[in-house]
Amino acid sequence: LEVLELTLICVGLLFAVRQQLYAAGASLGLAMATKVLPGLFVPYFVLTRQWRMLAGASVFAAVPFLAVCWLQGITPWYGLYSLIYQGGNLTKLEYSEYEYTPRAEIARMRAGPGGSVSAEQAQLAIGLHWAIAAIAMLLVAWVLSRSTIGPATYGLLFGLVAGTILLVAPSAHAPYYIFLLPGWTAI
């Protein structure tokens, strides 16, 4: 799913650079329908006042979401809760050698040579990860609010949001770092 998600983000970037802003938003909306984390583009659209991209993303994320809620016979509110919480994904702690997140790194440091963490250490790792993620999101919001928006800067700004997705993600493996591609390509 990450490959599909990245493809849709890159297609959205291509449309944005070509000034097809509704299509760019639609592609990002489909990325949001695929995985939750591209939802971090929504504040980007608001901060940069990209209303057509916001409209496209909203419609193309909401329609599949509402269709799935209807098919499963659940309310949209319960579906939204389930989508965001993801059955405990936000509060899980995985810190194997295959996990590459701040949460996993903090847990590995706390585990030490014994290789296991206590409940308090797990809560600390999760809490520190959320604090780091919140600080990063605020910093990115500040940068976006002060940036010049246009085709020449879309790649860097999309890359900044995609990099934030990696930092905020509760779990990430090495292949997830392909999300840095839009930013590196722009650089």
Image (cartoon, rainbow, N blue to C red):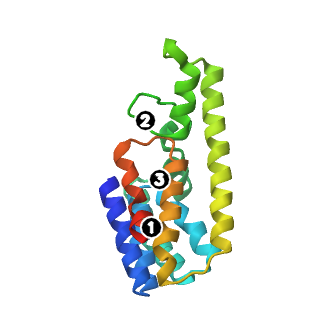
Figure check: 97 above or below 185: above
Residue that numbered label 2 is attached to: 99
Residue that numbered label 1 is attached to: 61
Residue that numbered label 3 is attached to: 74
Q: CA distance from mark 1 to mark 2?
A: 28 Å
Residue sitting at 67 percent across and 43 percent down? 131
Residue sitting at 47 percent across and 29 percent down? 95
Q: Quadrant of the C terminus?
A: bottom left
Residue sitting at 67 percent across and 73 percent down? 145
Q: Position of residue 93 (x, y in %)?
A: 51, 30
Q: Is residue 110 visible?
A: yes
Between discs 3 and 1, the one toward the N terminus: 1
Q: Position of residue 186 (x, y in %)?
A: 43, 71
Q: Are the residues at dot 3 and dot 1 in contact (C-beta closer than 8 Å)?
A: no
- Binning the other alpha carbons within 10 Å of mark 2 as few (below 14), some (14 to 19) or many (20 upward) gives some
Figure check: 18 above or below 142: below
Figure check: 170 above or below 83: above
Q: CA distance from mark 3 to mark 2?
A: 33 Å
* Of labels 1 and 2, the one closer to you: 2
Q: Position of residue 181 (x, y in %)?
A: 38, 61
Helix, strand or loop at label 2? It is loop
Helix, strand or loop at label 1? It is helix
